[in-house]
Amino acid sequence: MASQYPTVPSPAADATTLTPFKYSNRVLLKTLLERADQRPELIGQRVVIGGWVKSSQEVKKSSPITSSLHGDKKADESKTKDVTCVEIIQSKIPLIRSILEAFGGSGGCKKNESVTPKPTPPQPSTVYLMVTDGSSVASLQVVVDSSLAPPSKLRPTGTCILVEGFLKKPSAKGKRVIELEADRILHIGTVDPDKYPLSKKRLPLDMLRGFSHFRPRTTTVASVMRIRSAVSFATHSFFEHHAFFDVQVPIITTSNYEGFGKMFSVISLEQKADKEKLNTIDEIEGINLETVKAAVREKSNLVENLKRSDSNREALVAAVQDLNKTNELASQLEARGKMKSASSFKADKIDSSEEFFSCQTYLTASGGLHLETYACALGNVYSFGPRFQADKTDSSKQAAEMWMVEAEMAFAQLEDSMRCAMDLLKYLCKWVCENCSEDMNFVAKRIDNACVSRLQQTVSGPSEIVSYRDVIDILRKVTDKNFETNIQWGVSLTTEHLSYLADNVFKKPVMIYNYPKEAKPFFLRVNDDMRTVAAFDLVVPKVGVIVSGSQNEERLDMIISRIKELGLPREKYEWYLDLRRHGTVKHSGFTLRFDLLILFITGLTNVRDVIPFPRSHGKIMN
């Protein structure tokens, strides 16, 4: 099908020609603005661009009379010489008519004749639009003459435009080195300023969360999402470069992971609807159907009598409404009887055999256990996807749906996993510094002026590696702060403890390893001291733990002992135990909390501001 938009010349024809986006025949502003100051050959090129208006200004053009008053006198005189006598008389007619009217004359018109004034045409103007298409932080100034479109349609913030024109140098000096003078408008997506939420300048991030369908149009959220996209790409690049295979683990699982908090239960909508119907019907238990039918008959007779009598209309209306309600109650009672006789399950209990799955299922909180099965076949594997926790705490570092990067390596021990996790963090931070400089400069200016230096320090500087035992000793010696949780062996380190270590003690990423086994899940490898397990956490400033990893237990007897010790249902983990029965191998891995990594990179403080569509307790928009 032929494109509805004009064709931009192919870059093959001229090496200096801008390359349009392949699938919409428009030039991305990123390619246009990145090096416009270094590419003078762009001036004069004809392009099509599209985007959304961020700001605008309308400048009225001078009228012809004003121009002649302030123009060149010689030019005016030359024009006067060419004017004929007839034209002079015609131009003076309005003046003659005004003089006659002043002396009581009609000027050739009747006194009582009503003269409808002609509508004054709008004064010509030029509209200057700052347009962004989301491909970069920078915006392009687009100059549009009012003859092409009404300025009132173009100017509101959020208006979408697709225009064609020539690139030129800006008429006024400033930061901009190039602008587009439009001569064709191909599309206008209008906006109602009174209803469009982004019409107000600088809405706080917490208010923007209420408009998740519009907030990516803001510069801040757009920059964060471009950074997020780059880090996602870099994550896959890292694992591809180090011979990992990408494996998609299930989102629906039967494993109720210990140590991952509350999980979401999965239930089919059909059976849930049946249960709700039964619960509704049970609310009218104890009402006899025959009694209600007798009441219907009595009220029907009353309505008939009122219709035949001369009673007032209000009494009849009230009687009809009462009859309708009684009929509705009778219908519900009849439906209850039919459902009770046809259904094989009780109202207060769902028969699992009637469910979609034959056993209880959950939204996965971790894909680590499933990933192990592929590590024991493919060697090095990773997964990147959403994980779910039904945590009702209102934490700035937690959401119901968060994305995780999980990796698992066969023939690898705890030290290997720790080294791989740190290499990944350094790789991603370096990638952002090298490939997202414009967005990071904006983030440094708008959000956190130390974000770039923090990333550079992470890339170049060594991380601190300490054991859990050493951390306890360090925190016990702290005198300038009182922690809410007492520091003693065996306690889980809280966010308060970890933040203090990264922000105040080490002031850089710190890796803590060998935790007490009581503080970690059952499947972690027990160390020789029988008190600790081979686990680690990578803690970074301003955020806390962004990576958790471990060497998992490969010994069948030890993992069975841990399952029994914690009182877990062994039958649910028989498939997991099979990996230890058949071809067991030492293996280790880690989980990177992707959303928290974006917090660390950008300096934002609430994870909901770096998730495209955040879900948290009681809050879901679309």
Image (cartoon, helix red, strand yellow):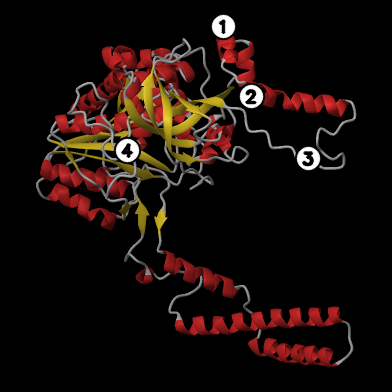
Label 1: few (<14), some (14–19) or many (≥20) C-alpha neighbours in 10 Å: few
Secondary-structure class at tag 1: helix
Secondary-structure class at tag 4: loop
On the image, numbered disc 3 is attached to which residue? 115
Q: Amino acid at mark 2?
A: Glu
Considering only order in the chain, which callout, 3 or 1, is on the residue closer to the N terminus?
A: 1
Residue 74's label in the rendered image is 1
Spatial CA distance of label 1 from label 3 is 39 Å
In the image, is 40 to the left or to the right of 196? left
Secondary-structure class at tag 3: loop
On the image, numbered disc 4 is attached to which residue? 6
Considering only order in the chain, which callout, 3 or 2, is on the residue closer to the N terminus?
A: 2
Task: Point out the frontmost of discs 2 and 3.
Answer: 2
Name the quadrant containing residue 570. bottom left
Q: Amino acid at mark 3?
A: Val
On the image, numbered disc 2 is attached to which residue? 87
Marks 3 and 1: in contact by CB < 8 Å?
Answer: no
Spatial CA distance of label 1 from label 2 is 20 Å
Coordinates of residue 89 in the picture (x, y in percent): 69, 24
In the image, is 274 to the left or to the right of 560? right
Spatial CA distance of label 4 from label 3 is 48 Å
